[in-house]
Image (cartoon, rainbow, N blue to C red):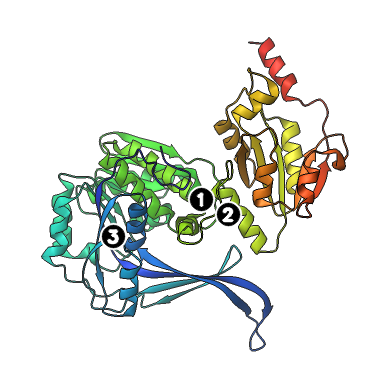
Amino acid sequence: MSAPSGRPTTTDPSFRIAVVGDTLLDVDVSGTSERLSPDAPVPVVDVRTDDRRAGGAGLVATMLARDGHDVVLVTVLGDDARATEIRDLLPDVTIVAGPSGAPTPAKTRVRVADHALVRIDENCGTPPVPAVGDDMTAVLDGVDAIVVADYGRGVAAAPAMRSALARAAERIPLVWDPHPKGAAPVPGTTVATPNAAEARRFVGDVVDVVDGVPFATAAAERLVETWGVGAVAVTLGDRGALVASATDGNRFVRAPSVTAGDPCGAGDRLAAGVAVALAAGSDVAGAVADGVAAASEYLAAGGVTGLFADDGPAPVAVPGIDRDAMRVVHEVRSAGGTVVATGGCFDLLHAGHARTLSAARALGDCLVVCLNSDDSVRALKGPDRPVIGQEDRVELLLALDCVDAVVVFDEQTPDEALRRFRPDVWAKGGDYKASELPEARTLAEWGGRVVTVPFHPGRSTTRLAAALAAVG
């Protein structure tokens, strides 16, 4: 089972994994924009952060290394300052690199709050296919699995590398994350993982199905035959993935419902998760399910921002506060928005709950639900409650568009959780005065407001539970 960040727990096995592919420098510039330039009608960005990381195959290697695996990155690098910076950004990865013969590419994304403003690409044209040395292919003999992260710059197209990869695919799992400008996966690849847009470019007009799962099914079947690979998993964003295999047919893998923002790196996270699952002995369909879950957890934890969150000052940990909630609160506050919170058991979610939650969300720019844990519900309601466990209650709440994050707490009141993220508004449905709510004193500590929202009589979890008991 994976941790909420998409990283394995301490009980998961560690493998030696090779990541083969093109490496670049990724830069994320974030700031605020409150005015236009006097020189032209363009926004002026006041920079707050400038985050740099290894991108492409380097990001996949980073993910696997942070998962606790022994990772070797097989790539090519230029002879310049950016290549040196990439090496410095990968202290926990063994790098076996040949010369690229080209300047190191860099991609800079400029973001304001949670919105991308522009991306600046440097040296990102297609260079000649690089030479591959024996040292680069030899390391493939001593690994448990291989991930090919093809970003279309030639490492996966080099003949010597392709021969080595084809030989390796005969004995160990090989996961190929393809690129429309890159090389086709080598025959014998265990599973290739294009997204829907990439699959569309690979099959062209041969597949005339319009969209969605029908297209993914037809495209995956076609690519299995064209490429001569064991399976193709066409990823469909927050819907999941369609896996086609020549031996096991087709299977749709549904993605968990999560609150997701920046999708950067989700495909890399999926490919890495598939490779680890295959190394552990999973079949392809099960491995893709693990990869989809890992990608969903990665997005829920903040994506690439959450992945590197541990590089900064560690947040003060308190029970019940998860990274997704803190990310949502931080992003809303950074954009000058209002954070709203509400709380309750939400056992047997009903229309009254939905109306109350929707009304609470309308009070601000995000809604964090403080949810009583199973132990807390038992202490409040008795040994027969809750009817639905906390994990399912979290999933049901997050499936509502009006809920941005959920925090589970064990106490009888959410006061300690509230003190951690300090919402601007505490909303509660009921027929009582805001000043009578027990959370009012807690919110007053930082100047927060308590608001009641419309109460809908006749909707009761207790009454619903009794009705269900009556019919068995």
Disc with the residue nearer the chain's start (3 vs 2): 3
Quadrant of the rendered image containing residue 91: bottom left
Compared to 66, does 377 lie above or below?
above
**Between 168 and 10, which is closer to the camera in this rendering?**
10
Secondary structure at numbered mark 2: helix
Could you tell me if the residues under marks 2 and 1 are in contact, i.e. CB atoms within 8 Å? Answer: yes
Res 252 → quadrant: top left
The answer to whether one can see residue 236 in this image is no
Q: Which residue is mark 1?
A: 301
Expressed as whole percent of the image width and height from the top left, the position of residue 384 reads 63, 17
- Image position of 153 (left or right of 47): left
User: For residue 458, which numbered disc appears in the image?
Assistant: none
- C-alpha gap between disc 1 and disc 3: 23 Å
In the displayed structure, 425 sits above or below 243; it is below
Q: Secondary structure at mark 1?
A: loop
Between tags 1 and 3, which lies in front? 3
Circle 2 Cα neighbour tier, 10 Å, few/some/many (<14 / 14–19 / ≥20) = some
Q: CA distance from mark 3 to mark 2?
A: 28 Å
The amino acid type of the residue labelled 3 equals Val
The reply to whether dot 3 and dot 2 touch (C-beta < 8 Å) is no
Number of residue marks: 3
**Amino acid type, callout 2:** Arg
**Furthest-bottom residue in view?**
39
Name the residue carrying label 2.
327
Task: Residue at 71% x, 20% y: name it.
Answer: 464
Q: Are marks 1 and 3 in contact (CB under 8 Å)?
A: no
Badge 3 is on which residue? 93
Residue type, label 1: Ala
Q: Is residue 46 above or below residue 202?
A: below
Residue 204 % position (x, y): 36, 57
